[in-house]
Amino acid sequence: AGGARDAHLGEGVVVGNLGSRILEALLSLPYRESGAALRSISSLPAQELLDYARHPIASRAVEAALKVGGDDASEARQLMLGVLCSGPAKLVRSRAGCFVLGAAFDASPAELQERLLSGLLQCEAELRATSHGNSLT
């Protein structure tokens, strides 16, 4: 536990600001140093990964995981993209999720980017009604 800046997520999971920053820094290292952390994040159950992606603190680590480069990281990135891009409307409803969705878009091949944009078009009217969604559309 990291004190007053920790935020509860789901049932009893605590995400600490300092822990999230450390994980974010670790994921900025080359894959041989960050691979274990990346594989751990990519193996999370789908709902848990989506919850972290929408969380104001944990989302920074998910975003950093999507930015890990190299062929070695490709499999883990693809697992995460499969979950995060499956329903973009779930992510864009939160400010933190928008940043993760942006990182997912940047990490995606062209076909998946098209699918993401199509998913966003389906909820465009709803997004325009939010302060953060309006800037996306």
Image (cartoon, rainbow, N blue to C red):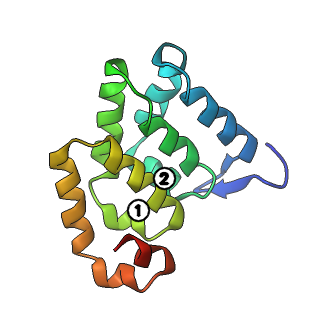
In the rendered image, residue 39, in percent from the top left (x then y), is placed at 44, 26
Q: Which residue is mark 2?
A: 53
> Residue flagged by tag 2: what amino acid is it?
Ala
Q: Residue at x 72, y 47 (%)?
A: 17
Q: Residue at x 50, y 19 (%)?
A: 30
Q: Tell me the quadrant of the picture where the C terminus can be found.
A: bottom left
Q: Nearer the viewer, residue 29 or 92?
A: 29
In the rendered image, residue 25, in percent from the top left (x then y), is placed at 63, 31
Q: Which residue is mark 1?
A: 91
Q: CA gap, disc 1 to disc 2? A: 7 Å
Q: Residue at x 63, y 52 (%)?
A: 57
Q: Residue at x 48, y 53 (%)?
A: 53
Task: Report helix, strand or loop for mark 1.
Answer: helix
Which mark is on residue 44? none
Q: Is residue 56 left or right of residue 44?
A: right
Q: Is residue 119 left or right of residue 61?
A: left
Mark 1 or 2 closer to N-term?
2
Task: Report helix, strand or loop for mark 2.
Answer: helix
In the rendered image, residue 10, in percent from the top left (x then y), is placed at 57, 56
In the rendered image, residue 88, in percent from the top left (x then y), is placed at 32, 61
Count of number-bearing discs: 2
Q: Tell me the quadrant of the picture where the N terminus can be found.
A: top right
Q: Check if mark 1's residue and mark 2's residue have beta carbons within 8 Å.
A: yes
> Residue flagged by tag 1: what amino acid is it?
Leu
